Amino acid sequence: MDNKLSEEEIYAEARKRVEEKKGFFIHLIVYAAVNVFLIIIWAVTIPGGYPWFIWPLIGWGIGLVLHCLSVFVFQRRTGWEQRELEKEVQRIKREQG
């Protein structure tokens, strides 16, 4: 099998990466908005009390960091993943005719 991607496959891969980045930024905005809202609730209801908002902030923050890593750091395909993708493409082409 040829390891080079066609123009169509390159475009599809680029589109997928852009969608993943967009998903991360949406996640980041929702994280910030919800956590600001939780901090406001804490400040209005029990100012100076136990900062309970820190637990969802930390827990969700860990998830956000992992999402960031998966999108921006570990986005490269492994050789195995590339071979499997090519197999699936060939299988789909055979099924279609």
Image (tube, rainbow, N blue to C red):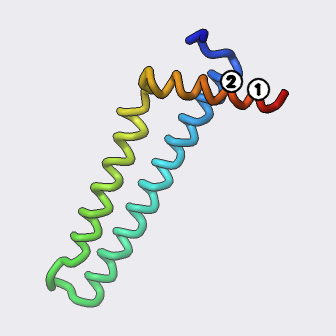
| Relative to 13, residue 32 above or below | below
- Residue at the (35%, 53%) spot, across then down: 64
Image quadrant containing the N terminus: top right
Position of 59 relative to 21 (above/below): below
> Could you say whether the residue bearing mark 2 is in a helix, strand or loop?
helix
Q: If the image is split into quadrants, where does the C terminus sit?
A: top right
Amino acid type at mark 1: Arg
Give the residue at the far right of this rendering.
97
* Residue 84: quarter of image: top right
Q: Are marks 2 and 1 in contact (CB under 8 Å)?
A: yes
Seen in the picture, residue 19 relative to 83 is either above or below; the reply is below
- Amino acid type, residue under disc 2 in the picture: Gln
Picture quadrant where residue 49 is located: bottom left
Q: Could you tell me residue 42's position as x and y percent?
A: 27, 82
Seen in the image, is 14 located left or right of residue 52? right
Q: Position of residue 27 (x, y in %)?
A: 45, 55
Q: Residues within 10 Å of mark 1 (few under 14, many from 20)?
A: few
Query: Label 2 belongs to which residue?
Result: 90
Mark 1 lies on a secondary structure that is helix
Residue shown at 52%/49% (left/top)? 23
Give the camera-side residue of 23 and 12. Answer: 12
Disc on res. 56? none
Name the residue located 66 percent from the left edge and 27 percent from the top edge: 89
- Residue 94's label in the rendered image is 1
For residue 41, which quarter of the picture? bottom left
